[in-house]
Amino acid sequence: MNTKLNKSDYILLSIILGVTSLFNVWQYYTYGNDLLEYLIDIPAYILMTIVAIVLFLYWLMPNYLLGKPNYFALISLAIVILTATGFIELLAGYWSCENDCNEFPVWHRAILNGLFVGADNVGIPLGILLTKKFYESQTQVVKIQKQQKENELKLLRSQLDPHFLFNNLNTLDALIDSDTVKAKEYINRLSLIYRYLIQTKDAEVMELSKEMNLAENYIFLIQTRFGDDYDFHVNKNIDFSNKFLPTGAVQALLENVVKHNKVNGENKIHVVIDIDEDWLTVENKKSNFTKTKDSLGTGLLNLKSRYQLLSKELPQIEESETEYKISIPIIKLSN
């Protein structure tokens, strides 16, 4: 759940504070309070309520509830925030009434009253905002899941696209006459790719090792089809255990390289796949025919949508005149 305030949250909070402030004005009028109390108490109430809500939503909940939960720290710090903001408002109200400071409640009673005031001020607006946030997050999850299913269907169709099969059959036809041994290897690699796609079509994530096996088979097809036009180098000197990727992620990145880079007959396209503990990065030299306008294609948009459900991190893209680099987070399902 995203706890950061958006435009509609600010509007809702303004309405809540505005309505409660009007009630306070009416109450002050009924009791015949002095003008100074209007000018001090109500702004103090609004300011302390906003401070407490911001601390809850931007610091306390993200660090002690939504991240790695620490309920003891959460409750303790929540009490401190409510007590501090309530105490400040209580002190402002006491001062605005021009009371003698010597008559201020003893410290333990003042702290307890501050907690009561803080909880009373923050409880309703924070509860309404959290309810709204929860509803929005659930709606967003449903929307992303729907979009993911649509993207996965498009991705599966593109993987089984007749053009993909047609291009590979053309390559295979040429190999049969020129190199029967390599033709058999090509058939074997192509069958492994299709078997993998069929077996994993319903899997959201797949082991990094299996994704890299798919990548090796896919690279073999590319290099066989295009000859020396593409040069691939893979750095994978890490332990692959407990490391996962969205299914078909590496294939989508390799497809992106081939789709948007065409060799001009002079310089080959150098592609480096680098894998560390947290990221898999594909970096390639750009050709003169790079379609920068469509640099983020359907496959990469699909990846971004899937990562919104699977990880806190999203794919990162860096692009210059000569190089294109995309990094995708490696997912760890257990400690």
Image (cartoon, grey):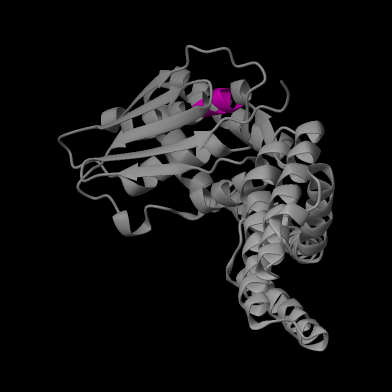
Image: magenta residue range: 211-215
- Residue at 61 percent of width and 56 percent of height: 4
Residue 334 location, quadrant: top right
Q: Picture coordinates of residue 157 (x, y %)?
A: 61, 53
- Residue at 41 percent of width and 26 percent of height: 273
Whether residue 311 is visible here, answered yes or no, is yes
Magenta stretch prevailing secondary structure: helix
Depicted 103 relative to depicted 255: above or below: below
Whether residue 2 is visible here, answered yes or no, is no
- Residue at 53 percent of width and 26 percent of height: 278
Seen from the viewer's position, the closer of residues 145 and 225 is 145
Residue 211 location, quadrant: top right
Q: Is residue 150 left or right of residue 7?
A: right
Residue 15 location, quadrant: bottom right
Q: In this view, does 95 lie to the left or right of 275?
A: right
Question: Can residue 43 be found in the magenta stretch?
Answer: no
Report the residue that reaches farthest toward the left. Answer: 266
Q: Picture coordinates of residue 144 (x, y %)?
A: 67, 57
Q: Is residue 15 left or right of residue 223?
A: right
- Residue at 66 percent of width and 27 percent of height: 332
Q: Picture coordinates of residue 122 (x, y %)?
A: 76, 60
